[in-house]
Amino acid sequence: MSKTITKNSQKLITVALSGNANVGKSTLYNAFTKKHRHTGNWTGKTVSNELSQSRFYNKNLEFADLPGTYSLLNLSKEEEIARDFLLFNKIGCTVVVCSALSLKRNLNLALQILEINKRVVICVNLLDEAEKKGIKVDLKRLSQNLGVSVVGICAHKKKTLIPLVSEIERTIAFSERPYLKINYPKNLERAVTFLEAPLKKLCQKKINPRFVALKLLEGEEKLILKAEKELNIKILTKDIKNDLQTARLLANMSPNEIKDDIVSALFKRADEALEGVITKEQKKDKMLKIDKILTGKFSGLIAMLLLLMTVFYLTIIGANYPSQMLSNLFSIAEGYLESFLSLLNTPPFLKDLICFGAFRTTAFIVSVMLPPMAIFFPLFTLLEELGFLPRIAFNLDRPFKATGACGKQALTMCMGFGCNAVGVTGARIINSPRERILSIITNSLVPCNGRFPFLIFLITMFLGTGSKSSLVSAAFLSLCVVVSIIFTFIVNSILSKTLLKGEASSFVLELPDFRRPLVLKTIWQSISQKTVSVLFRALIAAAPMGVLIFILANTSIYDKSLLMYVVEFLNPVGELLGLDGAVLTAFILGFPANEIVLPIIVMIYSFGGVIEDSLSNASIKELFVNNGWSVLTAVNTLVFCLFHFPCSTTLLTIKKETGSLKWTLVSFFLPLLLGMAICIVNKLIFSMF
């Protein structure tokens, strides 16, 4: 349907995709651009703009996937990003994506966009889902009521997008329609009309003067100053400031009262637009019973734990055989590589460096990490697509508020299970700067995808024993997640009373409808995007780290390798924590990526810093036990894996998002000190028995 442009000789036309969260914007964006941006059935998935170019009808189009927002008034970070893009960019057409399941709520944003953009198409998505629920939408009537083009689609069915593409083309080509005019209460309308007249000339047709008048009356002079800079116009003249004082007297309302009246007028206009548009048959919704269980005070938490255990259980039982198979394949491949290097007369040290340092470390990463990731990510994504993750966030909303945090942190925490850096970026959905920093600092307290393979190994080898080892391992892994969430609450509470004092703010959490995911497509995209992406990131760090460890292990001073000097230097601290110097060395060298901690430990314990050929989980356990590991070592390594400094990518993201070295250092040391404290306490407890 589209093809990516490599060279643009024609004028580039921007098409903005806007709308509420969870209406299918990213799915539509992917269909137009042939990209694979992650889509999810929950709020906060998109927190920044993404742009990509495609070609339609001999026109070069740039599609922009804007963050999902419910309004342009509240100005959370993602709302500000979306609003500024719509206001200050030359846009050929704005497609406002709405859901047929929640049109009234969606139209609130659509009406605001119609006030500031002249070329708009309303796109009603999820018509197939609405039909299943007995909901019918009269698109023609809605178009007449709004005075703008309305097109119905099912975003995941490409053939339904053809009319939308045609309407985008028509909207770009033909003349602009007038800005939508919302009628406000008499006092406010009188003030807006008075202020709008002198603004018309100053705005130079670059921005709606009526919109500017409303923003001035609301007291948003910062936005107007930004508009002056971005659009190269002068609005806040001395005369306008004087007129503004008069307009405020005419309105006789405070800025907050004006905002309330604006919202009320928008909802009233939405009701008028939907008059005679929606008809609904009475159908029993079977999913309501499931929703009551998943969102119940106690049943919701039990269901959440059972879901986690199920995902972990399937991951654990499914990963063993393919892991061993991959290990055997890489062992054969290594033999061929070694023979090939011998044929080239490669110097022995260089040959060993390539085979036993770079290649074997990389092979170990793939064989140990790929199988659990290839199972865990699709299962987790399927839960997300079904709509379970926002229900988990709903259950965690109350405890987050009780600790002085925002309930939206539950969403960013769920993002952190995939990647802590993504969770940090996701904190943009939180309005309060204090609560946003709180979410950023504590996000690394939950384990990311890079830590799960190591956690699974530790649990299955040292804790999940017996005839039902897989079930026990899944239970222990679920317990680890619960512990990480509990400590997130504890740290939130402490920070809210010390470094980040303040009260929790309220917000509205939308529970999306359950959706039947496209299973095969979801599994393929999850493996091809998430699994491969994380694995690639691990391999980039693994190969050079394997080379470094090999060199350190095989370079000696006074008959002792450089690596052993480092390990022995860290041994006293390691013993204090119930660990050893090798484990601490591995975590330090694993700073670029958590995924490489396990192979580094194996390399340190192996003779000459070389991972033994075709290592199975059982042989790795034997290697660890032979190097002094006990149950305490395994437990404390597990604790330290849960709570230690974030990886380099996450820290760089924290610095970028906060713009503060202070909060970056707090984010580094807080989980590290927490992990060390728990390890010391564990050692004291174990010493009593």
Image: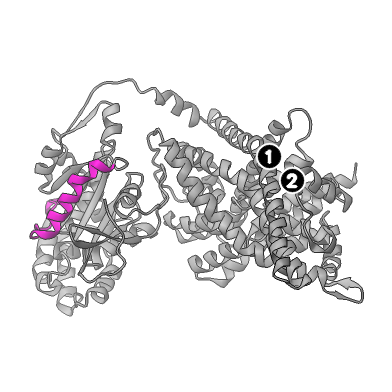
Report which quarter residue 463 is drawn in.
Answer: top right
**Residue bounds of the magenta highlight:** 158-186
Residue 485 visible in the shown view: no
> In which image quadrant can residue 517 be found?
top left
SS at circle 2: helix
Residue lying at 51% horizontally and 51% vertically, measured from the top left: 530
Mark 2 neighbour class, 10 Å CA radius: few under 14, some 14 to 19, many 20 or more: many
Give the left or right position of residue 268, taking residue 480 as reference.
Answer: left
**Location of residue 222 by image quarter:** bottom left
> In this figure, which residue is indicated by the disc labeled 1?
320
Q: Residues within 10 Å of mark 1 (few under 14, many from 20)?
A: some
Who is closer to the viewer here, 419 or 611? Answer: 611
Check the image and report above or below for 556 versus 154.
below
Residue 315 higher or lower than 586, as above or below: above
**Image x and y of residue 167, in percent:** 15, 50
Question: In front: 609, or 502?
Answer: 609
Q: How far apart in space, not on screen, are marks 2 and 1 (Cα)?
A: 14 Å
Secondary structure type for disc 1? helix
Residue 154 coordinates in the image, percent (x, y): 27, 39
Residue 36, given in percent of the width and then of the height, sits at 40, 52
Left or right: residue 24 versus residue 365 is left
Q: Nearer the viewer, residue 598 or 321?
A: 321
211 displayed left or right of 688: left
Residue 51: x %, y % from top left: 33, 61
Measuring 50% from the left and 68% from the top, which residue is drawn there? 656
Circle 2 residue: 458
Amino acid under disc 2: Leu
